[in-house]
Each structure stands twice: as structure tokens, then as C-alpha cells.
């Protein structure tokens, strides 16, 4: 039973962390629009790097 309880606690903690991260990112985008542009550039660089890797 303790194993199931531990697994549930871990899953709940992970869910809370994901929701908190999304909420924080959303508020950060609302407060400052500049980081979103930087993130888009990083994503584009990763995509280009992936295409070169292939």
C-alpha cells in the first residue's frame, strides 16, 4: 500500500509542477513580451540544428 501511496504523491507533485510551470510561463509572457521572442528564436535554432543533424 505504501508503494501506491508513494506513486500517487509523485504523480500529484509532477502534475502540480507542470501546471505551475505553465502558469508561471503564461504570467511571464503577459508581464514581458520580450522573453517570448527569445524563446521563439531558441526553438527555431533547435529546429535548424535538428535538420542539420539529420
Image (cartoon, helix red, strand yellow):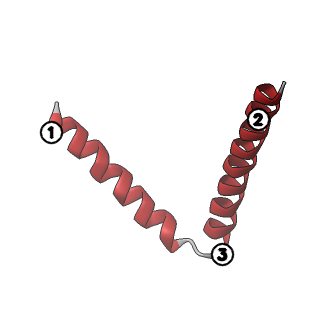
The disc, 1 or 3, on the residue closer to the chain's N-terminal end is 3
The circle drawn on residue 24 is none
Task: Identify the residue under disc 1.
Answer: 52
Q: Based on the displayed image, in which of its 4 quarters is residue 15 positioned?
A: top right
Q: Residue 35 in the image: x percent, y percent?
A: 49, 69
- Give the alpha-carbon distance from disc 2 to disc 3, as whole Å: 37 Å
Label 2: element kind: helix
Q: Is residue 9 left or right of residue 24?
A: right
The disc, 1 or 2, on the residue closer to the chain's N-terminal end is 2
The circle drawn on residue 31 is 3
**Mark closer to the observer (2, 3):** 2
Q: Residue 48 in the image: x percent, y percent?
A: 23, 45
- Give the alpha-carbon distance from disc 1 to disc 2, as whole Å: 43 Å
Tell me the residue at 69%/51% (across/down): 17
CB atoms at circles 2 and 3 under 8 Å apart? no
Task: Identify the residue under disc 2.
Answer: 6
CB atoms at circles 1 and 3 under 8 Å apart? no
The disc, 2 or 3, on the residue closer to the chain's N-terminal end is 2
Q: Residue 44 in the image: x percent, y percent?
A: 33, 50
**Mark closer to the observer (1, 2):** 2
- Where 11 falls versus 26 (above or below)? above
Amino acid at each position: 500500500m505504501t508503494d501506491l501511496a508513494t506513486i500517487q504523491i509523485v504523480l500529484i507533485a509532477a502534475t502540480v509542477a507542470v501546471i505551475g510551470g505553465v502558469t508561471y510561463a503564461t504570467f511571464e509572457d503577459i508581464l514581458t513580451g520580450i522573453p517570448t521572442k527569445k524563446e521563439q528564436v531558441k526553438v527555431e535554432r533547435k529546429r535548424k540544428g535538428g535538420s542539420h543533424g539529420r
